Amino acid sequence: MMAAGRRITRRGFLTTAAAGGFSAAAGACGIGAAPLPAAFAAPARRGGTLRIAEVGEPLTLDTVATTAGLTSTIMLPVYEGLFAFDDRWRIQPLLVSSYTVSRDSLTYTFTLRGNVPFHNGATMGADDVVGSLNRWGKVSAYGPSVYRNVESVSAAGTDTVVMKLKTPVAPLLAFLALSSGPAVIMPKEIADAAGTQPLRQFVGTGPYRFVEWAPDRYVHLTRFDQYAPRTEPPSGYAGRKDALATDIYYYPVAQVEARIAGVQSGDYDIADQINQDAYSALKADPRVDVGLIRPGSFLAFFFNEKQGLMTNQKLRQAVAAALDMESILRATYGNPDLYALDPSLFPKGTPWYTTVGASLYDVHNVDRARELAQSAGYGGQPIRWLTTQQYDWAFKSTVVAASQLRLAGFQVDMQVLDWATVLDHRARPADWDVFVTTFGFVPDPALALPFSSAYPGWWDTPTKDALFTQFNAEPDPRKRVQLWGKLQALMYEEVPIVRPGTAFSLMLSRKNLPGFTPRLGMVVWNVEAVR
């Protein structure tokens, strides 16, 4: 039994994110939108098929084991976790009904919702949660960061799970609510059978169940008629989820022009990852709605710190010094309304906004770059840079950055691959030196991908690890903000990534698609099919 703990009900969840460092005031940043009150909403229409054009073929559907946005998007309606973020990035209950935390913040006791069915007909219980969390702790890019502080996770009856920590983890619930590399719940036997290998069965508790993956053709989901929804109003990834469409198909459509034309013609209802230079024309098109996704995603060039050229910190500093961030962003995104040049990893209006490290951001000093490269012993070896043409931003930014580096005396080997192959290669330290990606907004720096030692790039220095551990263990929000400043400064010093800036991505949909709101991560429940 827990001594002198505190019990948190649904209302208490609204303030939990502040303990992890993100206050409810962030809603003033325009993050998300309040749902239409039920009294004013027209009755929802059920049935039909949603057809979604995605950027390409997923490498895997094992959403736990990858941070690839494509996999997260496709599997978001299939799986659920214990918690979820709402429209204002506050942590809300999903598969839990309540929880308690001991006074020393070392013991969390989660009480699960009852009678929640899996897609295979079994009922979710504590053993399933334990098995799922333990697998997440091994294979997710985020799980190991938590599990290095976990003493045990155990079932206490059929509906109660107890997590005991070695040291406090202030953003624990934020980790459990994240939809990228998520701590989703699946039947224990499936989690145990997969272990650290890829999942072979995709069984969750979500409003849609997995039907078929036909490679290079589609991924098919269908309504789960036995779904057990929450009763709270829909908000972000939280609240009530109603599977209005009977079926959902995700089609791999590599060419962005084809995705756009498909929505314009009515062949697709939604298209993801639209190139920014089409923004003005699409806003004027009466056939479609174009959504600007805020808060933005961060364009980033990740360095391989495990093997090869970029294990040399001075060489990473040299690359960073050579790059002109404004030119990269302008060439990649075009319209200045669609990007922001800023040294901070977090937007203004959040507690995490800081300009610490700004003197090392956007240096654009070729002479300094050459000096650092010479000091690093660089001898003209080719820098193997993974990129793709499937994402417009990935190819354009790589072309511009490579050109700037060549002017500074570097040799760049641009390896232009399909995105699934990029994901495959980036998991192999021997295959690359730099790869381009974006990582989306997260409400707590503990969730930021560059700081995960398990994420490709593998930033794992003693200084970073010690400071990051201290940051995650600190319960005082003010002290966490101070520690975050030190972490951002360290990022600019040790250079695990080069981050040109923030970009606002586009999502296209049919005109007035009922219930659809473009957001970070595509929410397709509560959306009506138009046919």
Image (cartoon, rainbow, N blue to C red):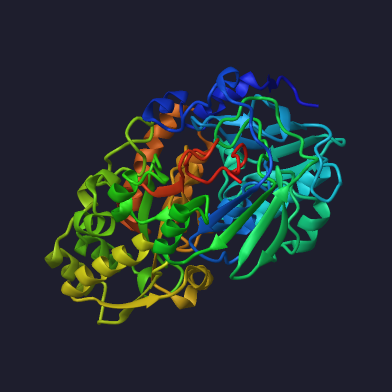
- Left/right of residue 456 with respect to residue 415 in the rendered view: right
- Could one spot residue 426 in this view of the protein? yes
132 or 235: nearer the viewer: 235
Q: Quadrant of the N terminus?
A: top right
391 or 26: nearer the viewer: 391
Which residue is pictured at 16% across the width and 73% down the height? Answer: 407
315 or 253: nearer the viewer: 253
**Image-quadrant location for residue 81:** top right
186 or 282: nearer the viewer: 282
- Left/right of residue 166 with respect to residue 511 in the rendered view: right
- Left/right of residue 424 with respect to residue 408 in the rendered view: right
Q: Position of residue 67 (x, y in %)?
A: 54, 56
Which residue is pictured at 80% across the width and 46% down the height? Answer: 118
Q: Is residue 152 above or below residue 352?
A: below
**Image-quadrant location for residue 8:** top right
Which residue is pictured at 70% across the width and 22% down the height? Answer: 5
**Image-quadrant location for residue 113:** top right
- Please identify the residue farthest to the left as the structure is shown: 367
